[in-house]
Image: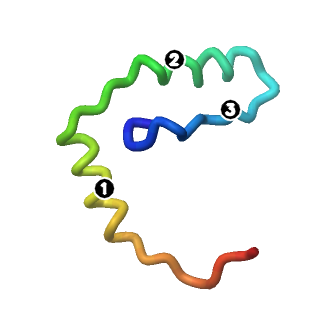
Amino acid sequence: MAQKEWIVPIPGTTKIHRLEENLSAIDVKLSADDLTEIEAALSKIVVHGSRIS
């Protein structure tokens, strides 16, 4: 969500306490350094196989 304003989370749960737990993520603030570190880690992941269309 920090990278694209059109990204919207879709919580998938049947338990109210889990929904409340998920909603608390709105309070998490990532710095520019955090995002850079996450992007660097993700760029090292090699995806194998083809996409299912």
User: Which circle's residue, 3 or 1, is located before the other in the chain?
Assistant: 3
In percent of width and height, residue 51 lies at 66, 77
Q: Is residue 21 above or below residue 41?
A: above
Q: Nearer the viewer, residue 37 or 9?
A: 9
Q: CA distance from mark 3 to mark 1?
A: 23 Å
Residue 29: image quadrant is top left
The residue that mark 3 highlights is 11
Residue linked to disc 1: 39
Measured Cα–Cα span from mark 3 to mark 2: 12 Å
At 63% from the left and 83% from the top, the residue drawn is 50
Q: Are marks 3 and 2 in contact (CB under 8 Å)?
A: no
Q: Residue at left 51%, top 17%?
A: 24
Give the crowd class for mark 3: few <14, some 14-19, many >=20 residues within 10 Å.
few
Q: Position of residue 7 (x, y in %)?
A: 54, 40
CA separation in Å, label 1 and label 2: 23 Å
Q: Nearer the viewer, residue 3 or 23?
A: 3
Q: Is residue 44 above or below residue 29?
A: below
Q: Is residue 17 left or right of residue 2?
A: right
Please state which amino acid type lies under the numbered disc 2: Ser
> Along the line of sight, which residue is nearer the eye, 5 or 50?
5
Residue projecting furthest to the right: 14
- Check disc 1: other Cα within 10 Å, few if <14, some if 14-19, many if 20+: few
- Using the image, determine if residue 31 lies above or below residue 52: above
Badge 2: residue crowd in 10 Å (few <14, some 14–19, many ≥20):
few
Could you tell me which secondary element the residue under label 3 belongs to?
loop
Amino acid at circle 3 = Pro
Instruction: Tell me the element at label 1.
Output: helix
11 with respect to 22 (left or right): right
Q: Are marks 3 and 1 in contact (CB under 8 Å)?
A: no
> Can you give x and y, in whole percent of width and height, for residue 27 in the image?
41, 17
Amino acid type assigned to the residue bearing label 1 in the image: Glu
Residue behind mark 2: 24
